Amino acid sequence: MAEESKMPKQSKDYTIIAEIYDYLMRKIDYKDWAKYIYDVIREYIEGELIVLELASGTGKLGTAFSIFSSKFIFTDLSNDMLKAVEDDFTKICCDMTLLPFKQKFNTVISTFDSINYLIDDKDILKCINEIEKILTDDGIFTFDVSLELNSQKYLKHLNRKGKYNDFYYIQQSNYDKMNKIHYNIFSIKKDDIEFKEEHKQRIYSIEEMIEIISQSNLQLLDVFEAFTFEDLHEKSLRAQFVLGKNNVNI
Ligand SMILES: C[S@@+](CC[C@H](N)C(=O)[O-])C[C@H]1O[C@@H](n2cnc3c(N)ncnc32)[C@H](O)[C@@H]1O
């Protein structure tokens, strides 16, 4: 029994990690990222933006985005992540494949690999079809996906350990190329109690994503190399998709 109590406690994704997430992401320039998302949106939408963010996490991007729109709802599957979002904002805990909204939005966004957490094609399809129901006719859904080269290039950087406040953490990252799954295993220790979270993300190819989108109720309007308006190329690390209801050819 004594041995058993020393075993790490298996936590649900994004529960314990919520305590150190902003620290782990401290080098990310969310202001710049929000401005890029805003520029993408403005290619398609004029006027007031009514925004729903899926998988907003601790809300860093949405908070930076709030200078562009005061009508912004944060959502995430993890209540622990949402707790970090300032209470002045509207935040709702929900699964992006099952959206609880009746109101319509002209802008739905998701950033930073969140869509890669949907492991199954069917979940991506479900997510897009849920968005279609709450999107205005002229609205868009824009999201990024992390590509295979990103998984391969930054593995070393993602194998790290450190201390933040009272938390000691170890992150082990590996990419299963055969099954196209990127694993991040976090061991986090606080007050002699060790927790473990195992994050699993599927790395889709562009062709796979385009095929899934073609089966959905939304149209692919554009796909860019993320942070630019350029076409993707063989060295691209992240893709920015834009979907809408209009019949626009890319
Ligand atoms: C890498 S974090 C990104 C968070 C935030 N977008 C950012 O830029 O910092 C991924 C987020 O996706 C959320 N997530 C994973 N699966 C989800 C799902 N099915 N529905 C909603 N959120 C989900 C996690 O809880 C986590 O907050």
Image (spheres, grey):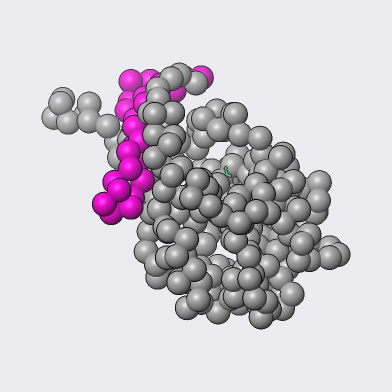
Where residue 242 appears, as percent x and y from the top left, is: 63, 64
Position of the C terminus, as image quadrant, is bottom right
Give the residue furthest to the front: 234
Q: Tell me, yes or no, if residue 104 can be seen here.
A: no
User: Which of the pair 8/206 is nearer the observer?
Assistant: 206
Residue 173 in the magenta stretch? The answer is yes
Q: Residue at x 40, y 53 (%)?
A: 203
Displayed quadrant of residue 188: top left
* Image-based side of 233 in relation to 36, left or right: left
Displayed quadrant of residue 92: bottom right
* Image-based side of 157 in relation to 221, left or right: left
Q: Residue at x 72, y 39 (%)?
A: 31
User: Which of the pair 131/13 is nearer the observer?
Assistant: 131
Position of the N terminus, as image quadrant, is top left
Q: Tell me, yes or no, if residue 236 can be seen here.
A: yes
* As drawn, 198 above or below 211: above
User: Which of the pair 89/137 is nearer the observer?
Assistant: 137
* As drawn, 165 above or below 178: above
Where residue 59 appears, as percent x and y from the top left, is: 63, 44
* Image-based side of 115 in relation to 51, left or right: left
- Most common secondary structure along the magenta stretch: strand
| Total numbered labels | 0
Residue 199 in the magenta stretch? The answer is no
Q: Residue at x 15, y 26 (%)?
A: 3
Which span is picked out in magenta?
Answer: 165-194
User: Which of the pair 243/165 is nearer the observer?
Assistant: 243
Where residue 165 appears, as percent x and y from the top left, is: 51, 19
